């Protein structure tokens, strides 16, 4: 600000957003939908590689070499948790003893995990839970404790993982 300027005269940087095109979803605008859905017919389409890295549509990577052996999920809670982790981390096969942070999980992904657990299993967990219970086996114990013996919830996998809809018991 220059000397003698009033607060109304001081330039203030701001961020403005463009209005989205009518008929396009937010996912299409951000490039997180498949190109056939995101672009009108006849329009050129390019995939946004950054959105695919941040939100993979399906697991793309094999299970890394970890210090633990693979142990398959054993019940509906562990299966649901493994599906959520696989979707968010982009890893094909996650065992119940695999550590979230050894699989390159971070606090941002942990927030997404807790949100999806809440949606899929109707259990609200604090963000810190993954720091205290960083494996599917440990997290499943916390989920079961919070559920208090309630029966498995019915949710769509689209709701649980953000993907295509497929109803079933979790």
Image: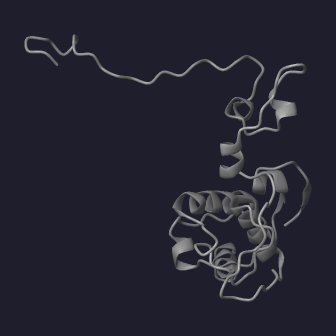
> Who is closer to the viewer here, 75 or 27?
27
118 sits left or right of 15 in the view: right
- Chosen colour scheme: one colour
Question: In the picture, residue 59 is in which quadrant?
Answer: bottom right
Q: Quadrant of residue 2?
A: top left
- Residue 23 on image: x %, y %: 78, 20
Residue at the (82%, 38%) spot, across then down: 34
Quadrant containing the N terminus in the rendered view? top left
Check the image and report above or below for 106 versus 158: below
In-image side of 130 versus 136 (left or right): left
| 44 up-or-down from 122: above or below | above
**Image quarter of the C terminus:** bottom right
Q: Is residue 37 left or right of residue 84?
A: right
Query: Among all residues in the image, which is located at the extreme left?
Result: 4
Q: Position of residue 48 (x, y in %)?
A: 71, 38
Q: Of 56 and 64, which appears nearest the observer?
A: 64
Where residue 111 appears, as percent x and y from the top left, is: 57, 59
Q: Quadrant of the rendered structure where residue 150 is?
A: bottom right
Q: Is residue 109 left or right of residue 64?
A: left
* Residue 71 point in image, percent of width and height: 79, 86
Q: Of residues 26 and 139, which is closer to you in this image?
A: 26
Residue 18 sits above or below residue 123 on the image? above
Q: Residue at x 82, y 51 (%)?
A: 158
> Which residue shows up at 58% across the image and 19% down it?
18
């Amino acid at each position: 600000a220059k000397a003698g300027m009033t607060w109304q005269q001081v330039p203030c940087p701001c961020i403005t957003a463009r209005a989205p095109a009518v008929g396009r979803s937010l996912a299409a605008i951000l490039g997180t939908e498949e190109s056939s859905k995101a672009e009108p017919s006849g329009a050129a389409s390019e995939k946004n590689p950054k959105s695919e890295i941040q939100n993979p549509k399906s697991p793309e990577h094999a299970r890394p070499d970890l210090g633990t052996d693979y142990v398959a999920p054993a019940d509906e809670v562990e299966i649901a948790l493994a599906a959520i982790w696989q979707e968010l981390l982009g890893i094909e096969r996650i065992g119940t003893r695999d550590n979230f942070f050894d699989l390159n999980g971070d606090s941002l992904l942990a927030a997404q995990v807790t949100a999806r657990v809440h949606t899929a299993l109707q259990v609200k967990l604090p963000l810190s839970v993954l720091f205290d219970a960083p494996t599917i086996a440990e997290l499943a114990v916390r989920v079961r404790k919070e559920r208090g013996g309630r029966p498995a919830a019915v949710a769509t996998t689209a709701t649980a993982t953000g993907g295509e809809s497929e109803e079933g018991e979790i």
